[in-house]
């Protein structure tokens, strides 16, 4: 059986499809021929199929490197539903679960996929066992993260090239949805491809129409868009406060909406996301934390209330519309203050190098990390409180932490949710001695309740539920927490409360802050690249002549594309004049509804059957002639 026949059989057997999407088969066959392969497929282009099918054809184990825990869990679950064995190792798993997962990869011959975060590649435990695994393929998702000139560079991705020496004949497939030509070349260099081998599907989305609209009344325009276009949608805003405010605004106008951001705890995020996926919520209002790995096909519109920081980010977010290949729109609303805010944000995003080094030093001192220690230790971090204690600007501290991440010294996880954990630090013998003392008499029944409720408390940390403990102890949750804290103070247990605070992980041992940036020129180069990205965003927003689709495609290296004929700039050219018949029809419609409307916005809303720009043009001309009064 040929490779082509084999992969079609796998596609039909596990996914039920008869044919691959464009470029998928070419990418898969390249991998099966043992060649390192770079695949650029736009959001919704079917990247996962490109490594899952060849991995099944090759047999053995495929290592999938991904920075997104939620995406890992989702893909593992989907593979298992197809009766394909898959597992994942990610932060938050205890040592026992990690060891069990590694053993499954070593000894279960049917295990096909191991998903890991790039940070995991640095650990000695993983590297030692990795060399013994039957690895037949390595897939690198979100591969733009390995390029220092990519918009989301993550230093741990550089470790991927280091593990290649263990598997010199194993092909590597790098996948991304957004990368400029410079970044594509850098990815292949960083992954040590022997020669360039790129498959790139055009980023053009014929079913997706882009609009950029200057608008003072953003909420009013957003509301009209949502009422005009039926179906599910996403509204992106810049900050967490706006997610709630915008969702509440939509709810007050009778629209099913909810908000989402990284500051919510894990279960809440999962619930909100699932309700939107299931259609129980029509509109999700979110920061850029929402959307990675979410494959909802019927999103009819994506609205940006604020200008995104990069065209890469905008392309990915807008691209979540119309994955079912049916017509969808992407609308960006802006005013001049938004552009000024972009420049302000850029300035604060790159605080002085000395300040960044000082923040690193303060973080180490804050968590009492000695020089040469701290590796793999993590702590909850409230940036606002940390900044207040030192009289720093919280936003500058946040940006400093993000830049320290780029050095590989730390990892900052805003979406952290850690359940409560408990372990007995006292031995059974010591516990019996405690119980014999009268002063601990009141604590004894509570200790016995804990031991009856959870097993393994003497050997490792066990996840607990304070509310359930309170129910069993017939007390309030606060009383249960007080008792757990009391046992901790007495040295009987180590109780770690649940937290939804962001987590700061020290990836390496502490170094002198002056050595944090081993090459300071990288800091200035990144600043220069970020400024160019900013200018590209502003050009995209401000250009009122060139087709929006062509502007985006040119940024990603496609310079020979044709105008879409549908975006706001294309329509401006088409609608430069209003025909006599169009004028007559619109003017007649305006006369009918004029007395019921308070102004031009009401007229536009009522006459949704006509082109909005033409309605405004005719209404203004009628006003100038004195036919109506606006």
Image (spheres, rainbow, N blue to C red):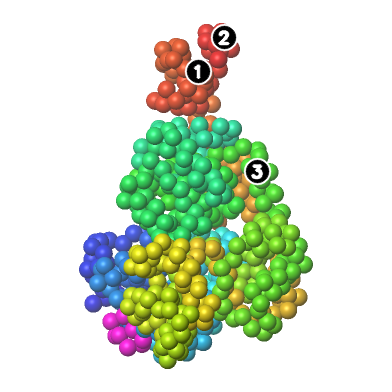
Earlier sequence position, callout 2 versus callout 3: 3
Q: Which residue is mark 3?
A: 339
Quarter of the image with the C terminus in it: top right
Q: Is residue 43 left or right of residue 550?
A: left
Find residue 29 and report its horizontal and vertical position in percent. Answer: 36, 72
Residue at x 74% of width, y 69% of height: 358
Q: Quadrant of residue 466?
A: bottom left
Element type at mark 3:
helix
Outermost residue, front side: 438
Q: Which residues are magenta?
A: 103-112
Q: Which mark is residue 598?
A: 1
550 versus 199 height, above or below: above
Q: Is residue 154 left or right of residue 64?
A: right
| Residue 94 belongs to magenta span | no
Precedes in sequence: disc 1 or disc 2: 1
Query: Which of disc 3 and disc 1 is earlier in sequence?
Result: 3
Pinpoint residue 405: horizontal percent, then vertical percent: 62, 69
Q: Can residue 141 be seen in this snapshot? A: no
Q: Is residue 240 left or right of residue 346?
A: left
Callout 3 crowding tier (Cα within 10 Å): few <14, some 14–19, many ≥20: some
Judge whether residue 108 is colored magenta: yes
Quarter occupied by the N terminus: bottom left
Answer with left or right where residue 308 lies relative to residue 468. Answer: right
Q: Kindly identify which residue carries mark 2.
A: 625
Quadrant in the picture for residue 528: bottom right
């Amino acid at each position: 059986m040929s490779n082509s026949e084999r992969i079609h059989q796998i596609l039909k057997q596990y996914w039920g499809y008869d044919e691959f999407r464009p470029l998928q088969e070419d990418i898969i066959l390249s991998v099966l021929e043992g060649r390192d392969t770079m695949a650029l497929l736009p959001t919704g282009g079917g990247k996962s199929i490109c490594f899952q099918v060849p991995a099944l054809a090759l047999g053995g184990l495929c290592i999938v490197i991904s920075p997104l825990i939620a995406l890992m869990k989702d893909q593992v679950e989907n593979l298992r539903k197809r009766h394909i064995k898959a597992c994942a190792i990610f932060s938050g798993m205890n040592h026992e679960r990690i060891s069990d997962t590694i053993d499954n990869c070593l000894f279960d011959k049917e295990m096909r996929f191991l998903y890991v975060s790039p940070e995991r590649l640095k650990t000695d435990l993983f590297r030692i066992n990795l060399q013994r695994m039957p690895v037949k393929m390595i897939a690198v998702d979100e591969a733009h993260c390995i390029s220092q000139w990519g918009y989301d560079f993550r230093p741990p991705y550089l470790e991927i090239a280091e593990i290649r020496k263990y598997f010199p004949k194993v092909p590597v497939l790098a996948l991304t949805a957004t990368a400029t030509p410079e970044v594509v070349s850098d990815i292949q260099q960083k992954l040590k491809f022997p020669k360039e081998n790129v498959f790139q599907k055009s980023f053009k989305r014929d079913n997706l129409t882009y609009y950029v609209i200057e608008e003072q009344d953003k909420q009013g325009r957003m509301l009209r868009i949502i009422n005009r276009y039926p179906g599910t949608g996403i509204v992106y805003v810049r900050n967490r406060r706006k997610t709630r405010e915008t969702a509440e605004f939509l709810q007050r106008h009778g629209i099913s909406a909810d908000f989402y951001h990284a500051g919510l705890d894990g279960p809440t995020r999962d619930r909100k996301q699932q309700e939107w996926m299931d259609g129980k919520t029509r509109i999700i209002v979110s920061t850029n934390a929402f959307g990675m790995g979410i494959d909802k096909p019927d999103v009819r519109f994506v609205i940006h209330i604020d200008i995104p920081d990069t065209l890469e980010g905008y392309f990915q977010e807008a691209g979540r519309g119309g994955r079912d290949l049916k017509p969808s729109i992407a609308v960006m609303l802006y005013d001049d203050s938004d552009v000024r805010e972009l420049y302000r944000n850029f300035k604060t995003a790159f605080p002085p190098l000395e300040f960044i080094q000082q923040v690193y030093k303060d973080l180490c001192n804050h968590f009492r990390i000695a020089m040469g220690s701290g590796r793999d230790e993590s702590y909850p971090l409230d940036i606002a409180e940390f900044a207040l204690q030192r009289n720093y600007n919280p936003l500058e501290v946040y940006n400093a932490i993000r830049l320290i991440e780029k050095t590989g010294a730390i990892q900052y996880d805003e979406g952290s949710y850690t359940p409560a954990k408990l372990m007995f630090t006292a031995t059974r013998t010591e516990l019996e001695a405690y119980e014999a003392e009268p002063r601990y008499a009141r604590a004894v029944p509570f200790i016995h309740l804990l031991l009856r409720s959870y097993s393994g408390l003497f050997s490792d940390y066990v996840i607990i539920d304070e509310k359930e403990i309170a129910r069993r102890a017939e007390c309030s949750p606060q009383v249960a927490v007080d008792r757990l804290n009391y046992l901790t103070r007495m040295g009987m247990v180590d109780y770690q409360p649940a937290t939804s605070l962001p987590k700061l992980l020290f990836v390496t041992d502490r170094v002198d802050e002056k050595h944090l940036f081993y090459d300071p020129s990288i800091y200035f180069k990144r600043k220069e690249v970020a400024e160019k990205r900013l200018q590209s965003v502003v050009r995209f927003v401000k250009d009122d002549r060139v087709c929006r689709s062509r502007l985006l495609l040119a940024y990603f290296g496609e310079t020979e594309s044709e105008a879409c004929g549908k975006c706001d700039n294309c329509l401006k050219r088409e609608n430069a004049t209003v025909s006599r018949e169009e004028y007559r029809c619109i003017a007649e419609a305006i006369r009918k509804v004029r007395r019921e409307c308070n102004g031009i916005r009401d007229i536009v809303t009522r006459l949704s059957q006509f082109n909005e720009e033409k309605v405004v043009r005719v209404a203004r001309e009628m006003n100038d002639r004195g036919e109506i009064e606006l």
